[in-house]
Image (cartoon, rainbow, N blue to C red):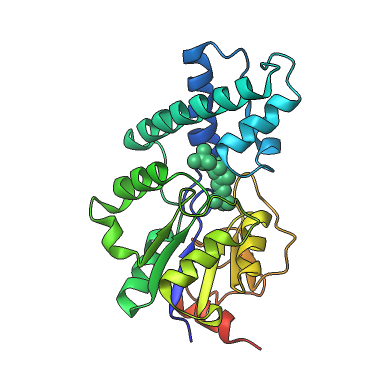
Amino acid sequence: MLRAVLWDIDGTLAETECDGHRVAFNRAFERTGVPWRWDERYYGELLRIAGGRERLLHDMESCDRAPHAPEARVALAAAQHALKNDYYVRIVKEGRLSLRAGVLELLNDCTRAGVLLGIATTTSRCNVEALLAQELGQDWSARFATVVCAEDAPRKKPDPQAYEKALEALALPPSEVIAIEDSPAGATAAQRAGLAVVVTSSYYFPACNVDVLARGPSLGTTEGWSPPADRSVDRIDLGQLMRWQAAP
Ligand code: XBP
Ligand code: MG
């Protein structure tokens, strides 16, 4: 029985990292005179570290131009992260990021069928609110039974905390819920919470080596999925999620 679908945001609902968070970080660096920038390739490496503030702190460990005192680094990371989120929200409001193919259709399938929707992300709440208001309208939150963000679950994926909190809010056993993720850390977090996971590869996570319920390139196509999806339709729909879940 499938009673709820929990969604990751970054990389899954939308390709937010390269043209969103990365660009916003660079704008914050530029604006405040921080003497480095993150190019597309290097940011991909940094994504091993979940959490924007944690990512910046990690990068400073190997950066000669970063302040030496630990307290100064912590303060710099906090200030840059807050400014980055402001720029990120602006980028979202300019309409520069959009839902990935097949996402809106699958959300609508769930709503129509009475399957609950939830968010389990380690990104900041302001980023989630901006993106979903932009893409789903101002009343977006009415569509979600739970929205767990970094502020609710400070332990970043692959820690299962975000998924555990979401499950607690849904008051459902994990066997009745599917998570949709893009990254190995995200898939691992969901699995540690006992959930079956469907992985849609993203720009920065083209392959996920975690053993999951199903994996494929995009919810907007039935090609390239393992296990194979029903190719008589052109996207991953709720029926397909249910068939994968019911498969032995
Ligand atoms: C998302 C993250 C976030 C974003 C940036 O991971 O790791 O840190 O990159 O957002 P996931 P913040 O997709 O697994 O939830 O700067 O707000 O952390
Ligand atoms: Mg993700």
The image quadrant where one finds the C terminus is bottom right
Residue visible at 42% across and 40% down in the picture:
97
Q: Position of residue 177 (x, y in %)?
A: 50, 76
Q: Is residue 106 left or right of residue 223?
A: left
Q: Is residue 60 left or right of residue 140?
A: right
Ligand 1 - quadrant of the structure image? top right
Q: Position of residue 190 (x, y in %)?
A: 60, 65
61 in relation to 239, above or below = above
Q: Position of residue 96 (x, y in %)?
A: 39, 36
Q: Position of residue 237 (x, y in %)?
A: 45, 72
Please state which of residues 36 and 134 is positioned toward the viewer in this rendering. Answer: 36
Residue visible at 74% across and 15% down in the picture:
64
Q: Residue furthest left?
A: 139
Q: Is residue 193 visible?
A: yes
Residue visible at 47% across and 49% down in the picture:
14
Please state which of residues 127 and 220 is positioned toward the viewer in this rendering. Answer: 127
